[in-house]
Image: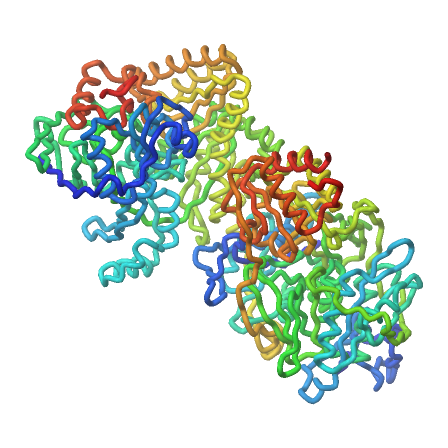
Amino acid sequence: MMLINREKCNQCELCIKSCPFGAMTITEQSAQAGDECTLCGCCVNVCPQGAIAIQRTPVSQKDLARFCGVLVVAECEERQGLLHPKKVVYELLSKGRELADKLGQTLMVIIMGDDRLADLTKLGHHGADRVLKCVHPLLKEFSTDGFTAVLSTVIADIKPGVVLYGATPNGRELAPRVAARLRLGLTADCTGLDIDAENQLVQTRPAFGGNIMAAIIAPRTRPQTATVRPNVFPVNFYDAAKIAEIREVSLVLNKSMIRTRIVQEVCLTEEQEPALEEARIIVAAGRGYQTQENLSNARRLAKKLGGVLAASRPLVEDGLLPHTRQVGQSGNTISPKLYIALGISGAVQHLVGMNGSQTIIAVNQDPKAPIFKIADLGIVGDADAVVKSLLTKLEN
Amino acid sequence: MNIVVAIKQVPEISNVQVNPETGTLIRQGVSSILNPFCEYALDHAVRLKALCPDIRITTVSMGPPQARSALMRTLELGADRAVLVCDRKFAGADTWVTALTLAEAIRCTVPDFHLIFVGKQAIDGDTAQVGPEMAEILHLPQISYGTACEITGNNKKIRVQRETESGYQILETRLPALVSFSKGENIRRAPSFADILSSRKKPIDLIRAQDLNIADQELGLSGSFTQVVKIFPPLLKENGPLLSGLSPQETTATIIKLLNTIDVLEKKEGSL
Amino acid sequence: MHEITSTPMDEIPIETIHQINGFDAIKENYPDYLTDESKLTMGAFDFLFFPQNESELATIVNEMIRKKICMTVAGARTGLVGGCVPLCGALISLENLNKTLDLSYSESADEWRIKAQAGVLLSDLATMITGKCFSDLEPDLSPETQKKLIHFKNDPGRYFYPPDPTEMSASLGGTVATNASGARTYHYGPTRDWIRGIRVLTMAGEFLEIPRGKYFSSPGGQFTVYDSKGGHTPIRIPEYTLPRTKNTAGFYAAPHMDLIDLFIGSEGALGIITTIEIALLPWEPKCSVIQFVSSDDKALHLVKSLRSDKRIQLDFMEFYSQNALNLLRKMQAEDSRMVGMPPIPESAGAALFFELGFDPEMDTPDYRALEETINTAGASLTDSWAGYETREISRFKHFRHLLPEKVTQVISERKKIHPEIHRLSSDLAVPDEHLDDIWNLYKERLNLANIEWVGFGHVGNNHFHISSMPRDMEELARGIKIYTEFAEKAVSYGGTVSAEHGIGKIKAKYLKTMYSKDHIAQMKSIKTALDPDLLLNPGNIFTQETCTK
């Protein structure tokens, strides 16, 4: 329910300008919300007097049923001048397709950006029934304010039962912001998603640094929202014949709604080097293998195998490699075909990040190193000698 | 200028073990510490204060009575005042209720705050949700994954270096704002014995449910939107052979054999 | 009473006991067993045993006695003076005698006690005591044992075993054999003070059960040991007076002394200790403090002031000299994360590391006495690092251990170029009044001789660790001369040649610096009484170049 404090309202009309549904008017010297109001919450933030509040009660059983459909939030990245959905979006679509089928509901995907948005038909091939295309110049780069406003509006309007985000840095900022605005339950970093007998979304995720798993539900709020780490769900739905309906969403966005400004942007990864999350082969260095010479050899080995170099957290914290190369609970989650761990002990926070690798080879001096618990091939020995010997063999 | 740093006391995760039968944590012998990311947030507040001694740092924590020791730590490390938000009614709160409770507590105790600093995530929950949710409740702009910051624009703006997947950005916003940090001092700071003694003289205020303008049913477990239905230990991969005592050449041969079976190496004439 | 009788144990067929034969096989498959932390190696030896229990040990030992084969006993091989390095014969590793046998509460002494076998590691003991979890005792479902375990678990207090030798991976047996000490010895005393009973296997092949407080030397300074076969061995206690310092050189001797003290610190020369009963102390919360001062002299001044002020109770006082801080600064520059502490302040010339009782819950802690004393040394409590959380106490401890580890590392590097090079370290302690004298001696001699050295250690006990890292053989030779002078000077001040590490084999030559010929002969006669064929741990304390046969 919309609560407007008449005394605080100074009729500045900012709320009228920012309401995407045109629901606000000034009546009797105070702003008021009409029937078109969806409680998306955009006006609340915008009001400089703090005169607007939304009181939300959890959705009743009857109303729960009205929320229908699975919505995937398609985060994009720029490649060669266009905005393409990130790989994680296709993973979410595969999972979303499975969930939507179980529920007998529609799979939708919302994509936000400016006129450089690309690959919309691909979203259909990967399972989407409907694409909600949100184009606006102010969405040309990610901003919490801009994307929260648009997404909240769309969710309030179409009322999906489930919303899925990639647990990327941006996703992990956006999802809680939207959840707070719309008073929704949110589960972060899910490694499992399923529908139970009551048609609820059961969200499974690691906690305590990965030491335990928790299964979570959001019984009283809709939509149920969750973020999912990249490389957790496989991309296993593809139908070249499937065509998604593309719907253009009209947006109300103005500059004053976006309160953060990008002053500078710096890219640390080499253009040609694939992102860690998408690498097929990874050679990772840990504390037991961190001299400059070691890292240079590890890089050579990675290159020779057609893979990329990564690192565990201590090396990144020591500044030896940028955080873009970090694997682990507070770094990247990866699931390459091959993961070679050099001098990595395998603390659980690291394992959580690479446990999904298909084949793991670990070299460490300590026979008790936890990494050996999940290695397909464990070698107790000096990583330096092993890498040098491997390089000699491979380079001949 | 008032900087509020919201902190959490967490178990020292590296020492945590799981009971394989019940899947629950074995808490015995595991110390409680100031969440490392929260300590980073405090590091940045203290750095700003060193440049501008007018700054007053208030740390706030929602937790059980023992969270007091984490707040005490923040006072030793340079905070001026601490607030413990503690009440049985807060128990069982999910991230939403935590954010709601903390936001309200901050409104009560430091109504004229300029900045709220938080850590990226707590190492027990790992959700990274409370910061952004607090920002939304308080209608603040937010900047996350901060690794460095400076106050600019005549004390009206803050610039933050934000980690991105491909590198970093510098973002700027007007105060008041909320910033969450992913990096701080490389090595944990050590207060002097004098700091430890003088911190005992700094105030730690207690805020209870009755001090907050939130209805009981919106607090704790009853106010939560998410519910944990099951806890179980993680399923990690099974391991393969562990070899030791091999020469580097023998090791290489073994590795190459494995690489061949998983089709990673290009087959050349006369394969390896 | 001064008479004690040993009891035999039934032997089992020796063929059933696992043994490794032949030096080549031992060298190939068990290279770690050739030496200890000192890296000393002696002769080739032919047998290696890992007895699983006392029966196996008794069998092995009796067999060796019958065949007159020398035997050397090893615990965790962390010793620094070659105590477990064999000359010849057999090496018996007690690592598998690692069971905890009993937990009990002594009403009369109002203390908890634990009985454990010699092979239990100190670190495992600490884990058991902190976690109040004894995996060897839990399976015993007898009501008595279960009652004791529950009583201990329900006791809200925390407990600890006070002697904390720096090396926690040492075996309990090893620490009792050497009467090990550590930083905390300053306040709590050495290992000896915490041993309530031992069980010893003698060279008569039988076991002596020695609780503290039962067997005392006669007015004439004598003990008599009887065995089950009717043999009797008189032992006369030496007549020297022990130095007024921490001491691990030579046998314990005092009028009306307890028999247990003869074996504690005897470095395996007199018998094999198989079981030990230790006492625990209630733990109290502490705060670690590293106080920075402007110079070495100011640090020593502070030591004396803190020592003399009865209001100030410190658990230990450790010293970082100027060159120690400089070495640590270098290490921080190379790998700050490994060092684990914030950058050492530039203005710091030296530092004291101490620990004192501190209750984090206390609202108004009063440390004015400490503050005043520190101010008189020209320092301020604001120039310190302090911490009381468990992980803080750990990282302060780690910071202290980095120095000896670094010295070892530097020596290893230098050994690559000069294979014969080794570190020089002193283990000398002097009485309180000679603190300045001995420090000034160290500093003058080593600086003048242009030797690379670092000074740190248990300054509270006037026990400096002076470690030199010679850069070539010439420097090593110069250093050896100087260290000999140090030992002689320390003794002349009423101190000891070995405060902590023991004599073992490496320091055997220093025994005569400290004890007269007669006194050494008195010690030797105890050895020959209890080990007539000189079979046990040959070379420990009493120089022996080759084995007797």
Residue B212 horizontal/vertical position (percent): 61, 72
> Is residue A7 visible from the viewing direction of this image?
no
Q: Is residue A311 left or right of residue B28?
A: right
Q: Quadrant of residue A166?
A: bottom right
Residue A199 horizontal/vertical position (percent): 66, 82
Q: Residue at x 60, y 35 (%)?
A: B249
Q: Is residue A6 above or below residue C348?
A: below
**Front one among C135 and B35:** C135
**Front one among C166 and A205:** A205
Q: Residue at x 68, y 62 (%)?
A: A232
Q: Is residue B206 above or below residue A281?
A: below
Q: Give the quarter of the figure containing the C terminus of chain C.
A: top left
Q: Residue at x 16, y 24 (%)?
A: C532
Q: Residue at x 84, y 56 (%)?
A: A261
Q: Is residue B231 above or below residue C199?
A: below
Q: Is residue C227 above or below residue A192?
A: above
> Is residue B34 visible from the viewing direction of this image?
yes
Q: Give the quarter of the figure containing the N terminus of chain C.
A: top left
**Front one among C429 and C122:** C122
Residue A128 horizontal/vertical position (percent): 81, 73
**Quick one: which residue is furthest to the bottom in this view?**
A62
Q: How many marks?
A: 0
